[in-house]
Amino acid sequence: MKKIKAGFATRDISPEKPVPGRLGLNHMIYPHHDISAKALALSNGKGTYLIIVCEIVGLTKSVNQKIRKIITDKTGIPFQNIVITGTHTHASPWVWDLQDEEARKQGFEVLDRDWMNKVIGNTVDAGIKAAQNMSAYQIKFGVAETTGIVSNRVLPVTRWSICADDELRNAPEGIVDRNVRTISFHDSNDKPVFVFANLACHPSAYGGGKTTKVSPDFPYISENLLKEKYGENTTLAYWQGCAGNINSGKYVAEGSDEEAKTIGTNFFNSVNEAIKKSGRISGDNSTFEYIYEKFTLPVGKFVNNPGKARERFKNVCSEMKSQKNIDNESVFKWRRILKQLDVSLLSAGKEMEIELQLFRFGNTDILFVPGEWFVQMYKNLAALNNKRNLIVTTLNNFDLLYIPDEKSMPNKDWYGVKTDMRSLGDDSAIRLFEKAVEILA
């Protein structure tokens, strides 16, 4: 029976000049650290599969599918066998192509299109290069508890800081999942060559709002420390877990290098501990199972039809143009209504397309889901899947926005997650969770 083979590649996707940031309006971010697309290719003798991680806020369905189609056309790897996620670093440029198209009609630019084309081209190249040179590696699963990183940001506010503000730093963490879970690929000398690290936490040490620096955030610090320990060829790829309501450290408009370094060092210590404690994935290591499911779900009643959503955005743009001094509240309102237009156009005000992608190695499941799931949803899935290791990685596309757990749904205005910043209504969000349970069964 043929053994699993793996190949790896990393390509630069950094902007070469200041580009629009997450707020998309009066917000520019400046090159600080390089950001990358990191690709893993897998083959079990029956098929080839790609998992690519981009150190950006997230990919829209249209850009995600464009990258996958190019790779499929050039390599023959089936479209559904390609998984692309974003790390969701908040210190990253904005990549929403449809939003930019609509904003430009009203005189606003929220995307550097030259940079987006670089992301598309170099992400494609990373995937192709990873698949061109595959060898046999040991695959291991590890888990370790993190300290001084994660904090729940939903009311009651329990955010805290490592570097400043004693009151916040010493506040409770709230409902969190402190564990980092690693999937590591080891060479014949048992040295980790490529490491996926999954944590239910936004990479937001540089801030959650008007960050001015482009960076992979705290995973960048951790990767450099891993390179110091294991060699320059070691790659760390970040998988954001169910972190819709979870952040790192203080959640402020602008973070700091000190915060990123502190949290990054803490993360390295935990990832390294997980690697040291890791063991070969039990069961049949010579093959793996891949399950792909595609379906649609109705959007929420709060999603307007495209005509009404476009008119509402046009009106808020007129308001912005009439203001001499644009305050933060106006910017957030503008951004939220642009997001709502994006969802309306993608869904035609009716339903959203969903993909679930599951890799099953021996006793370990790796489930890729769209949107930003709340941490409680992972806990619920893990409880149902308690005889197997479980990793849930979010943001295989970003168009679904926030996916709250059922207990959080009655609160229509929690911190940063207003109901109208979602795509799915409560019933569809519950059904999405049920579909995840079904695919894991």
Image (cartoon, rainbow, N blue to C red):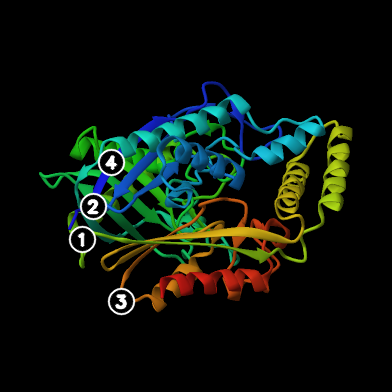
Pair 3/2: label in front = 2
Reading the image, the residue beneath label 4 is: 7
Pair 1/3: label in front = 1
> For the residue marked with disc 3, what is the amino acid?
Lys
Reading the image, the residue beneath label 2 is: 4
Q: Is residue 329 left or right of residue 192?
A: right
Q: Earlier in the sequence, mark 1 or mark 3?
A: 1
Element at badge 3? loop
Q: Earlier in the sequence, mark 3 or mark 4?
A: 4
C-alpha span from label 3 to label 4 = 29 Å
> For the residue marked with disc 2, what is the amino acid?
Ile
C-alpha span from label 1 to label 2 = 7 Å
Q: Is residue 132 above or below residue 427?
A: above
Element at badge 1? loop
The reply to whether dot 3 and dot 2 touch (C-beta < 8 Å) is no
Q: Position of residue 33 (x, y in %)?
A: 43, 30
Which label was assigned to residue 387? 3
Q: Is residue 381 left or right of residue 278?
A: right
Reading the image, the residue beneath label 1 is: 285
Q: Is residue 389 above or below residue 52?
A: below
Element at badge 2? loop
The reply to whether dot 1 and dot 2 touch (C-beta < 8 Å) is yes
C-alpha span from label 4 to label 1 = 17 Å
Outermost residue, left direction? 189
Residue 18 vs residue 372, the one in the foreground? 372
Element at badge 4? strand
